[in-house]
Amino acid sequence: MRRLAISLVLAFALAPAAAVAKEAVSAKVCGASDCRTVKDRQALMTLMEGGGPTDPPKRGAGWYEVVMTIEVDGDRHETFPLAIVPSEGVMRGGDEEAGYNWMTVTDAGAREYRRVTRGIAPFSPSILDGLGRPEAKVDEVVPAPERPKPEGGGSLPLPWIAAGLALLGLAGALLRWRGLPVRRSQPS
């Protein structure tokens, strides 16, 4: 019995995991003037191809919004947004909350996007999020450390010097008033 249990555990561990089937079913490509829906499987595969990671465009350029719809396990649909900047050859995935990822568009993808967007005016460069440097997000505010105070109270010596001079002056005035001779040095 024990050998059978060990054999079953090894068989399940070595068996390939059930693959989750994901397939693109449509893409809605929108610009400032119009939208087009793409359902051709070959075109969808080309539109989803992305190259390696890259930096966002240095300058603004016209862009298109793409909402990809994929079918998961044949019964559930998920969507995800993309932004395509054809003149720069880049696409952006992600969102404001999680952050944006930029990647290059393949040559075939660039040709397909030009075909799909022909006659559609792009969105204005000024409304594309995720350009330039990412904004810092503050999780916690930490105050600056307090500066250590100097030993001995940390007060300035000037008031003490003034008080000492005043006491010396008062002592000298008191001695004169009592008639005690005050020693003066003679110039040589």
Image (cartoon, helix red, strand yellow):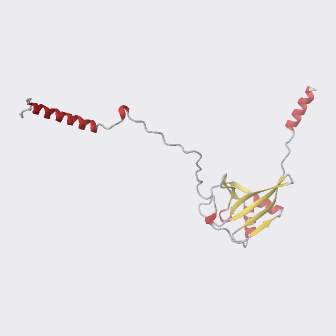
Residue found farthest to the bottom:
119
> Can you give x and y, in whole percent of width and height, for residue 131 in the image?
61, 59
- Pick whichever, 174 or 30, lies toward us: 174
* Residue 171 appears left or right of 67: left
> Can you give x and y, in whole percent of width and height, for residue 177 in the image?
10, 33
Q: Residue at x 71, y 55 (%)?
A: 51
Residue found farthest to the top:
2
> Can you give x and y, in whole percent of width and height, for residue 165 in the image?
21, 36
Q: Quadrant of residue 30?
A: bottom right
The answer to whether residue 159 shows anywhere in this view is yes
Q: Which residue is drawn at 62% across and 60% down?
A: 57
- Pick whichever, 20 or 181, lies toward us: 181
* Residue 83 appears left or right of 171: right
User: Up-down: is 151 above or below 67?
Assistant: above
Which image quadrant: the N terminus? Answer: top right
> Can you give x and y, in whole percent of width and height, for residue 98 in the image?
67, 51
Q: In which quarter of the image is residue 29?
A: bottom right
- Pick whichever, 169 or 133, lies toward us: 169
Which image quadrant: the C terminus? Answer: top left
The answer to whether residue 115 shows anywhere in this view is no
User: Up-down: is 159 above or below 130?
Assistant: above
Q: Which residue is drawn at 40% across and 36% down?
A: 149
* Residue 86 appears left or right of 76: left
User: Up-down: is 37 above or below 11?
Assistant: below
